[in-house]
Every structure is written in C-alpha cells, then in structure tokens.
Amino acid sequence: MGNAWIKKSLIRSGVLPLISRFTGHGVAILMYHSVMNDPASEELTLGGIIHSTKVFREQMEVVARYFNAVSLDDVLLFLQGKKTLPAKAVVITFDDGYADNYQAAKDILSPLGIPAVFYVTVDCIERQRLPWPSLLRHAFLTSKKNSWPEAPGMEWPLISAQQRIQAFDRASEHCSKLSGGPQGEYVESIQQQLGTAPPRPTQRLMMTWEEVRGLGRSGHTVGSHTMTHPNIAYVTESEARAEMLGAKNKLEQELAAPVVHFSYPCPALQPHWREHTVSASREIGYQTAVTTNGGLVRRHHNPLSLRRIRPTKTVDGLRWNLECAFLGRTV
C-alpha cells in the first residue's frame, strides 16, 4: 500500500516526466498479446497473457494523454538517423494473432490515433489453431492423470496446480526446440499421454486472414511471428530460416504488401535470438525485429534486435513502468 501511494504521488507530482527530459531520447515498445472482457474465461489456454478490455482501454488512454504514440516505421527512420521522434515515444505491439486483436484492441486503438504492430503466427491463422504453448497448457491443466511420463523412469507428478505448471514448463522446453510437423506431433503425443483433447473454446480465438487484412486497412502494421512459433535460437539454422522466410512469404501473399517487421517468439528457453538469427532476418528482408529483452530502444541500437517492455495488468503500473523506463531504469 505504501509503495503504491509513493508511486502515484511521484507520477502526479510531475517530477518523473520532468527528469526524463534530460535522459536522452528513446522509444518504449510495449508488448501485448490478447484483450478480452473476461480474461478468466481462457485461463486454461492463454493464462496470464490476457489483458482485460477495461484495463487495456485505460492504459491506451494513458499512452494517448501522457506519451507520444508512434509507428514502428517511425522508429526505423529514427534508428537510421532520418527522423527525430517526440519525447517519450511509445510503440504498441501484439504477438501471435488472436482474434481479439481485431475485434477489441483495434477498436480501442484507432479512435485514440494509436498505431500498433500485430505480429502474426502464420500457421495459427491458416489452421485456426492456438499456438502450441496454449495447447500444452490446456493439456496439463485439464488432464485427469496423476503424473506425466517425460521419459522411461522419469515421472512428473500432476497432483497440485503448481506441479502441473512445472510439468507444462518442462514439456515447453522440449517443444520450443521443434518447428513444423515435429512440433505438432509432439503436442499430439502429450495430449495422448495425458488423455486430453484439444481445447474447444466458446469463441474463435485466432484472427482470420480477412481480419489480418483489416488491420492494415485500419492503418496498423502487420508483422511476422514465424510459421509455428518455435524458439528459433534452438532450432537448426535451416529451420529458423524456413520459419522466418515462410511466414514472410505467406503474409505478403495474403496482404499483397511487403512485410518487413518481425517478432522473435520467446517460448520457454533463453536466449530466444542469436547473432545468426539476426543475420538471417536481415538476409531474408526484415528491417526490424523485436525481442522480449527489457528496456528502451536508443538511436544506436540494432533495428533487428529491439528491446520491449512488458505491460503490467494495472493502469498506474503501466504509467510507472514507462516513466521509469524513460528515466533509464530497466523494467
């Protein structure tokens, strides 16, 4: 309670924004995934990556009032030394391609004049299938089994909720190293071991291609998030290139427009990008690539390994994190 009061008081005093004027220009790239009226409705699949519609709307109102929303194309020009950005510049990004990005987030962003970048996992749109972390999460949290046999002689208990999450994390480490067909086969093998069926959501959870195109028509940017969401730092270099190039080609085919922005998936293991993936993204034709490493983007940073900031689940928390970031504190 005391810390929250202190934070609110500092923000309202105007001291933090004043100090941030002297710390140099930078850009805060915020990372979102999903926006729903009732985040609890998809707790078994998406878990904590959902923001409530109410909180997201209020957070975007804070961005519009106290910060300066810019596009990722603006950031690229800034990094190339071709453009000066306003103080406290903020970019909004979404990963994966959930249907609520179009059905809810777009309708909050557009009236506020906030451009966003939506990074799409192509296979999830094409097959109308949740990303594999959600499929594994659902399997481990809904299974009626008391244990999971990771390997002969290695059993993971599934008695408590904590044990189920630990087993899910372990399986995610395996799955994050797979892409394409082998990845899908691994997910199916886990579902068979645990005696579960794929989730049957009460609503469509992934965007359609027409909705993806609709984001572009609404003034937003569509970027690539690979084909099947592996950790491309752990797959082979040829698999990583196939994931990045295949997604770019498919998106450009569907959108009839260049796709030059990329987001590295970050499932389970670290790191989630390496120097060879940066080189590959450049050769493939991406001009920017965002990571989940925290902090501001500064003018000297490589546009193919940009930092992002994870938003909090509260409005005051988001503003505090942004103000601290512009003061040079990593959040």
Image (cartoon, rainbow, N blue to C red):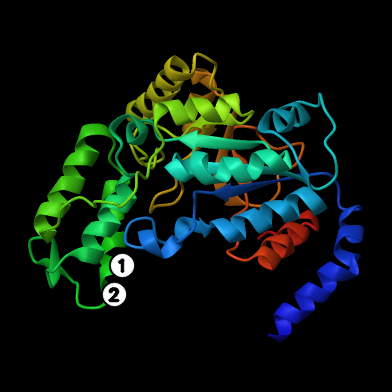
The structure residue drawn at horizontal position 87% and vertical position 59%, both measured from the top left corner, is 17
Quarter the N terminus occupies: bottom right
Dot 2: what SS?
A: helix
Vertical relation: 243 (above or below) 134: above
Disc 1: CA contacts within 10 A as few (<14), some (14-19) or many (>=20): some
Mark 2 and mark 1 residues within 8 Å of each other at the beta carbon: yes
Q: Which amino acid type is marked by label 1? A: Ile
Q: Position of residue 302 (x, y in %)?
A: 66, 34
Image x and y of residue 204, in percent:
35, 44
Question: Which mark is drawn over residue 161?
Answer: 2
Mark linked to residue 210? none
Q: Position of residue 293 (x, y in %)?
A: 58, 50
Which residue is rendered at x = 67% and y = 58% of the image?
58
Residue 317: quadrant of the picture: bottom right
Total number of numbered discs in the rendering: 2
Please name the amino acid that badge 2 sits on.
Ala
Q: Residue at x 16, y 41 (%)?
A: 185
Alpha-carbon span between mark 2 and mark 1: 6 Å
Question: Callout 2 environment at 10 Å: few (<14), some (14 to 19), or many (20+)?
Answer: few
* Residue situated in front as seen by the camera: 141 or 234: 141
Kindly identify which residue carries mark 1.
165
Q: Give 312 or 272, whichever is nearer the viewer.
A: 312
